[in-house]
Image: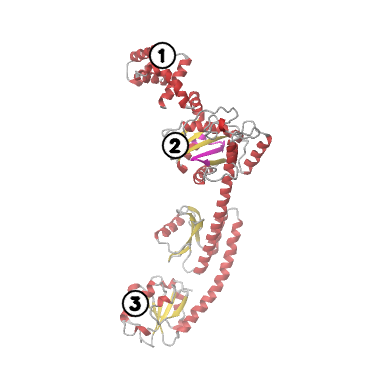
Amino acid sequence: MIFQDVLDHREFGLRELVRGPRSHGRAVLGAHVVEAANPSRWVPPQWIVLTTGLRLWRDPAAQRELVAELAEGGVVALGFGTGIVFDQVPKALLEEAERRAFPVFEVPERIPFREIVRMVDTALLGQDLRTFRRTAAITDGLVQALGEPDPETALVAALAGALRAEVSLHTEVGAVLFTTGSYTTGSGAEARWRRLRELPLNAPPVEVIDADGLFATAVEVDGDITGWVLVEVSRGSLAVPVILRALTVVGKLLEGLGTVRGRELARRRTARAELLHRALALRPELPAGVVAELRDHGRALGVDPDVPGRVLALRLAGVAPEPEAPRTSDPDSPYPDSRLAGRESAARRTQNPDSPYPDPRLAERGSPTRRGREADSPVEVAGVERVLAEWRVSYLVAGDSGRVVVWVVEGAGWTGEELGEALLGVADVVAVGVGARVTGLARAREGLADAELALASATTARPVVSADRLGVAEWLVLAVGPERVKERAATVLAPLREQGFLVDTLREYLRCALSVPATARALHVHENSVRHRLARVRALLGRELHAPDTLADLHLALLLEVSR
């Protein structure tokens, strides 16, 4: 029921004295007779107050205060009965009502207030019955939408159909996920979002945003707002309680869907991490039973273990590259150095020779009993998963100790380096090492070793490095450990240490493919100066510079010289 419905009862002879903006369309939830002071204590918002002004006689200040209190309390209108205390509505009261644009109407002496109260109550009772029936029908339709393949979209569409309104579903920051109505391009949904953000929010989860028929509800999952549903209804086309109830139901259903999906996502994330951890810990020679288990587990998660793929190792912000460790002497270890096998010397491990896992801690890592940050890091992994989903690749992800490891099934249309570039900046990823292509998930440990080596050579200037692009010398240095190789390589350049310009000349000479003219241009000197310097280098080293073994030693030594 709206205020216009009350005024339209001609048998009452009600006369509107002050009209407020859009007051005729305001919903009326009841009518009450009040002669006591402070009526807002007894009358809730959206009601009509009826009074004869018994306490207002010869008190203009009290008359003004009454209007101010009712207007501030959200009362729809004041009905003033004349012929009992006042012959006409007091002038001070009308002046204050005009100033505040607060509706006031006159009730003739012949109309008892109880008749107006009865009329409003009867109308509301009938409306409540219709509202109940309509709400029940709408709720049934909304619940049925849960059975659709895309229940979120189906719910929004069902709500729009039930309310004959335009409805849009937004993310928590306003991006349009789905919209109905005439503005299928989303411009109408964006306009609704702007209206929402321009006004203060007072009473979540459901609010009437403005008098033009905009309603909103926040979708909350585990205490966090994950989205918004906005409804735009033609003013007066539908009872407000029906709209509020329907919107509340949709909000709760979307909340339930979000909770279920979140739990399922967490379960699948844990399962994927467990599978990848197990694959990364497998020995090269796998028992048939382990291979079958790996295949069944992978296919259940939508990843075919028999398809070739790559491992990507992701370094996160604030995590320094790990120090080099001595290479393990364990011939059964799948890792080229002890960092990848658990950062512990092989001599300190206790291994079961019958286990497919070279390190029992790696087998443990995939167990459901090992959870938490070390087994999985959801905050880091979630952003990475979003990118992988956008690229439409089959993947497994596991995060631990500030590092994220990804297995991606190889596909057409992208390279490992392109995927690495897309992951930079996501979830604090600052560097990516891309492993070489391996024949399947069972060989993922080999891909991880290559990815770790590539990641170790990543720099700020070159944050994405592929193992495929590592030279043999660089690969060997990284695999053995730069610190060990530097001790031996330092002796190669030792005779030149006191004459640094000779080292610079030699470096440019190798970079310029042993071309004297090109070296001279790079150093901005005469060609004869370059030839003279190279002759001195040959004399000091006692080696022929064009010999293959000399070139290999010099290239490796200079490579390590740069990394000092």
x and y, in percent, of residue 52 in the image? 39, 84
Magenta span includes 560: no
Q: Is residue 377 above or below residue 164?
A: above
First along the sequence among labels 2 and 1 = 2
* Residue with the mark numbered 2: 320
User: What stretch of residues is rendered in magenta?
Assistant: 399-418
Q: Mark 3 is on which residue type?
A: Glu
Relative placement, left or right, of 4 versus 133 is left
Q: Residues within 10 Å of mark 1 (few under 14, many from 20)?
A: some
Instruction: Report the Cα–Cα distance between label 2 and label 1.
Output: 37 Å
For the residue marked with disc 2, what is the amino acid?
Ala
- Circle 3 packing at 10 Å, graded few (<14), some (14-19), many (20+), is some
Which residue is under mark 1? 541
| Nearest to N terminus: mark 1 or mark 3 | 3
Q: Quadrant of residue 357?
A: top right
Q: Which residue is mark 3?
A: 65
SS of the residue at dot 2?
A: loop
Q: Nearer the viewer, residue 465 or 209?
A: 465
Taking the spot 44% from the left edge, 75% from the top edge, the residue there is 47
Q: Position of residue 488 (x, y in %)?
A: 46, 21
Q: Which amino acid, by three-letter code, is at mark 1?
A: Leu
Marks 1/3: CA–CA distance: 104 Å
Disc 3 and disc 2: Cα gap in Å? 69 Å
Query: Residue 533's spot in the image, x, y percent?
Result: 35, 14
Q: Earlier in the sequence, mark 3 or mark 2?
A: 3
Q: Which numbered tag is attached to residue 294?
A: none
Is residue 165 found left or right of 535 in the rendered image?
right
Tell me the quadrant of the picture where the C terminus can be found: top left
